[in-house]
Amino acid sequence: MNIEQARFNMIEQQIRPWDVLNTDILDLLYEVRREDFVPSNWQPLAFVDMEIPLEFEENMLSPKLEARLIQELKVHPSHKTLQIGTGSGYVAALLSRLSAHVTTVEIHSGLAQQAEKKYFELSLNNINVEVGNGATGWPGAGQWNSILITGSLPVFPQSYLDILAPGGNLVAIIGDAPVMTVQRWRKDRQGIIEMDQLFETVVKPLRHATQPVRFEF
């Protein structure tokens, strides 16, 4: 397999046609090697439009969804960014090149350790890996400029809006299969929240996510 040709095809045939047009992000996909974060037994499929299985029954998001979520987050180089759901570690690696600092949270210590090792090998020194359950919120009132939640949430925890800094954006995937919606919350400088519904997708929910109240008749 010609890796660079496969990478080019991924970007030009999958990601760009999916409305990922930010040149900084497209350029970054050439620089941060996706295959470095793909399990060895799945390396031949590193650039394919699919979710790649990880340990602990987790998945690496498809390349086009990773890139689109990052684009919709509108990260600035001065931002302090929070990611919930480290997974393979690839999304946080991309965010680290766009942000001043990234904290990424993973519930599985094994995945967290693998990501931390990879960041050390790649000299990505502005990423902090935390082990914990971020499905219902995370500490740091008003301190995060960008928040990306990379597993789905059946119900959006309002506590996340408390930790979003004024002027910041939060992107999350909300709902139940078969229909989930990527939503973006923005908090303006006065603390007023606006929410936009961006596009539909389906991904696995975060573990221990809050479930909607269901009525039985």
Image (cartoon, helix red, strand yellow):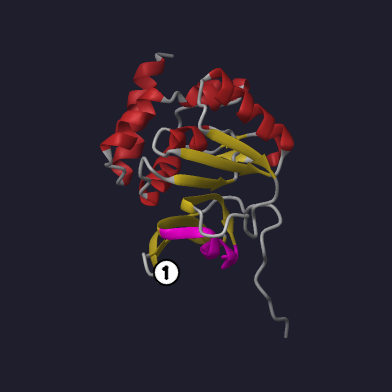
Between 96 and 100, the one nearer to me in the picture: 100
Q: Quadrant of residue 24?
A: top left
Q: Residues within 10 Å of mark 1 (few under 14, many from 20)?
A: some
Residue positioned 68% across, 30% down in the render: 113
Q: In this image, 66 relative to 128: left or right? A: left
- Image position, residue 100 (x, y; %): 43, 38
| Residue 176 in magenta stretch | no
Identify the residue shown where x is 49% and y is 37%.
91
| Viewer-closest of 192 and 194 | 192
Please state which amino acid type lies under the numbered disc 1.
Gly
Q: How many marks?
A: 1
- Is residue 120 found left or right of 95 in the rendered image? right
Residue at the spot of label 1: 191
Q: Nearer the viewer, residue 107 or 207?
A: 107
Residue 85: x and y, percent?
Answer: 60, 45
Indicate whether 208 appears above or below 104: below
Q: Which residues are magenta?
A: 154-166
Instruction: Say left or right for 8 vs 148.
Output: left
**SS of the residue under disc 1:** loop
Give x and y (percent) for residue 59.
Answer: 60, 39
- Name the residue at 46% across, 56% down: 170
